[in-house]
Amino acid sequence: MPTAILTGQPVPGSSIEGDLRSLGFDVRTAADATEAETLLAAVPGDRRVAVVDARFVGHLHALRLGLTDPRFPLAAVPGAVTAQPAGRQALTRAVARENSASGGTTLLDSLADRIVTALDADGSEVHRPELGSLVATVPADPQARNEARQAVAAVDDEAVRLRSAVKSRDGFFTTHFISPYSRYLARWCARRGLTPNQVTTASLLTAIIAAGCAATGTRAGFVAAGVLLIASFVLDCTDGQLARYSLQYSTLGAWLDATFDRAKEYAYYAGLALGAAKGGDDVWALALGAMILQTCRHVVDFSFNEANHDATANTSPTAALSDKLDSVGWTVWVRRMIVLPIGERWAMIAVLTAVATPRITFYVLLVGCAFAATYTTAGRVLRSLTRKARRTDRAAQALADLADSGPLARPLARVLPGTSRIPAFFWALAGTAVLLLAAWFEGPGWPLVLCAAVYVLLSSEAVARPLKGALDWLIPPFFRAAEYCTVLILAAEAEVNGALPAAFGLVAAVAYHHYDTVYRIRGNAGAPPAWLVRATGGHEGRTLLVTVLAAALTASQFTVALTVLAVAVALLVLVESIRFWVSAGAPAVHDEGEPA
């Protein structure tokens, strides 16, 4: 149980002790700095501890935000400071310093606020939550206390808590058609002790049932699938709102939330393809194309954000224009809708599933996603070319990790000069063009294998130096497009039943590995272990292997090989991913949803 140490003179009628107990704290009282230091030392090092001024006046939710958020080692609001085990040493030093400075005398002023000042002076990062209209203060006299209490009474902190449970930036459909009631569903779940992970799992199960309904191939099944897909999205919104409402953030929860979003959407694509097949229509190529396009869109987002989130001198006329457009109300919603975020996308898929055919659904999805990808990528290219930014070593390493270079490219990258004046992204673009043109026009055969070898060489040259160029964030998306589309083209060329579903499974397994890499980097947990990248072959090794298999085997044998490869990759990445996230020491976070 976490411990709260109340300091200073108690105030008759104050609710602070009851408020702290309602938040799960064991409350102890210190009369002076020496006693506070003694009580702090007695709290086990693996527990949260807080120091709170007994004169504190404020909303319960202000205390909750300041003292219970698991994402930050140190956090504070006026009159209260808290430390998790990771911040405990810094807090202990600050309390000892204040005790020494005061000589252990009675606490007449706020020890908590003085501790925060000492932490700031030490260079410790103290999180201060945005309180908005919530009150958190330490009144200096009875009149100020009365005024503070009146300010508390004037603001309904439960209403503020409900509003803050909803993301401040979200899509039009989510904001206007889901969040107005899903926030109340989140509160209902919180009051019944449900966790965000349980809601996330319920969302996944609902989506899988929706995919099963779509796989029936009947109109009733398609209608049920559309309804259930929307229900799954409501639960998907609810889990994040529940996490924010009750501050139940966790590393595992962030991974489940992000991973299940991809699993739900891609499983639904497979369900639609199965349903279409029962009606005599083969749309597996469209389903795989939709998955490839959507994954590549996400890789563009992830790579661009990782390349620029800590860049210095990050200015751009294009970015300035974008910010100016955001100040005009209607343009904000238009720009959020045309990128086809998850809410709009799932709503479109659900409606089309219910009223049209799977083929039409995929056609519209592909056109919409292609337009959105063109719009967002073009804007980011313009920003990259017009901004004068210096990319950091951390950003360059993140791009290298996202590239997923394996046992062929990495040794080659070390021996290649990497000093060419040609930008690194150009080598990736050239390799991708050579590979895909050969796959499209030549099809399976040894000439394609030769082109795949050229792709290996060019992709190695692309990563032979630190990825700090203006457009080097395009390298991971190029590699994803090269690998995924090669698998799609060769499976389609096989013209054998089962080839495209096997290719769908392989791309899904590899895409999971790439998403997992992103989520590790986002959680500041580093890239997947080097042994996993070597074992899965890296993007270039897998691509070369698939072209060799297509050239050396018959169409039926190639289908079996794709299936075996898909199972092998899936087992490797899933087992390692689950092991890592269940036992990870990464900071507690919560995924705020896909960027596009």
Image: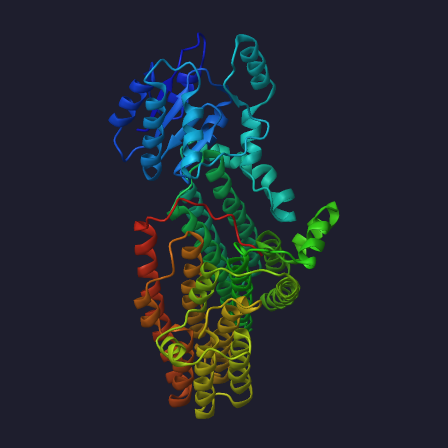
Residue 216 in sight here: no
- Quarter of the image with the C terminus is bottom right
- Quarter of the image with the N terminus is top left
Task: Please give left or right for residue 420 compared with residue 340 in the image.
Answer: left
Which residue is at 43% across, 30% downward? 116
Spot occupied by residue 301 in the image (x, y as percentages of width and height) = 55, 60
Which of the 4 image quarters holds residue 89?
top left
Determine whether 415 is above or below 278 in the image: below
Which residue is at 44% across, 7% downward? 12
Q: Nearer the viewer, residue 351 or 148?
A: 148
Snapshot colouring? rainbow
Spot occupied by residue 311 in the image (x, y as percentages of width and height) = 54, 57
Which of the 4 image quarters holds residue 180?
top right
Which residue is at 52% across, 73% downward? 478
**Number of numbered tags placed on the structure image:** 0
Q: Nearer the viewer, residue 378 or 557?
A: 378
Spot occupied by residue 186 in the image (x, y as percentages of width and height) = 50, 36
Determine whether 331 is above or below 45 in the image: below
Spot occupied by residue 439 in the image (x, y as percentages of width and height) = 51, 85
Q: Nearer the viewer, residue 546 or 499?
A: 546
